[in-house]
Image (tube, grey):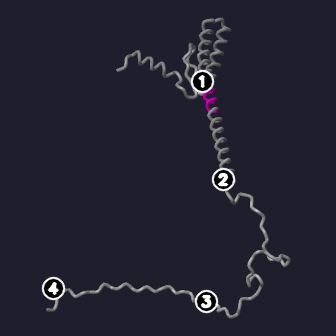
Amino acid sequence: MRSSKSRSRAKNNRNRPSGGNVVNRVFDSSGPEGKVRGTPQQIIDKYNQLARDAQLSNDRVAAENFQQHAEHYLRLLSEAQREMEARREEQERQNRERQAERDRERAERQEREAAARQADPAEAPQPDVMDFAPEASAPESGLVETPESQGEAPPAEAPAKKEKAPRRPRARKPKAAAEDTPAGDGDAPEAAE
């Protein structure tokens, strides 16, 4: 069981912001003039207005009290803004690091692709196509002359190739039906004596 002191401390801590977006959070402030409700900036403005009113009515104690309440919320707001700025700077730093990493990876990938293109023979510069057509002015090409290259027809006595008829697919034999054997008395057939 908790003691009353720990319960009261826990109750006091509930009103304090625990992270989150303090700048836009709505607070209920219990000041000397009653409750003031709003975001920290709205509460600061309200307490500053109440402090000016108290100062005009020559109530220095109330003016000081309202200024202290405004200062409390001003500190709360400035601390939240510092945390938000630090968080934003951290995110920007992480984004810059991620972008630098992506840039390094892209550069490495481009270098690998360039190296692969240089190693690929299809990407290498190709020699010019040479024309090997026979020319009348070329006396000696170093090639053996064949009847086809001289434009002669093949000799007539060469037997012409027979064209084969297209093959027919083989017909499969039907599966043999299981032969029915007459059921005997279970004895094996005896051999003749």
Residue corresponding to mark 3: 163
Q: Label 2 sits on what residue type?
A: Ala
Q: Label 3 sits on what residue type?
A: Glu
Whichever of labels 4 and 1 marks the residue nearer the N terminus, that label is 1
Question: Which quadrant would residue 125 be assigned to in this image?
Answer: bottom right
Q: Residue furthest right?
A: 137
Q: Dot 4: what SS?
A: loop
Mark 4 or 1, closer to the camera: 4
Question: Camera-side residue: 33 or 169?
Answer: 169
Please say if 71 is above or below 107.
Answer: above
- Residue in the picture at 46% in, 86% down: 171
Whichever of labels 2 and 1 marks the residue nearer the N terminus, that label is 1
Is disc 2 in contact with disc 4, using a CB cutoff of under 8 Å? Answer: no
Whichever of labels 3 and 4 marks the residue nearer the N terminus, that label is 3
Question: Camera-side residue: 173 or 140?
Answer: 140
Quadrant of the frame with the C terminus? bottom left
Q: Label 1 sits on what residue type?
A: Ala
Please say if 148 is above or below 141.
Answer: below
Q: How many labels does the image show?
A: 4
Mark 1 or 3, closer to the camera: 3
Q: Dot 1: what SS?
A: helix
Whichever of labels 2 and 4 marks the residue nearer the N terminus, that label is 2
What span is colored magenta in the figure?
Answer: 80-92
Give the CA distance from mark 2 to mark 1.
53 Å
For mark 3, does the 10 Å Cα neighbourhood hold few (<14), some (14 to 19), or many (20 or more) residues? few
Tag shown at residue 113: none
Residue corresponding to mark 4: 185
Residue 81 in magenta stretch? yes
Q: Dot 2: what SS?
A: helix
Residue corresponding to mark 1: 80
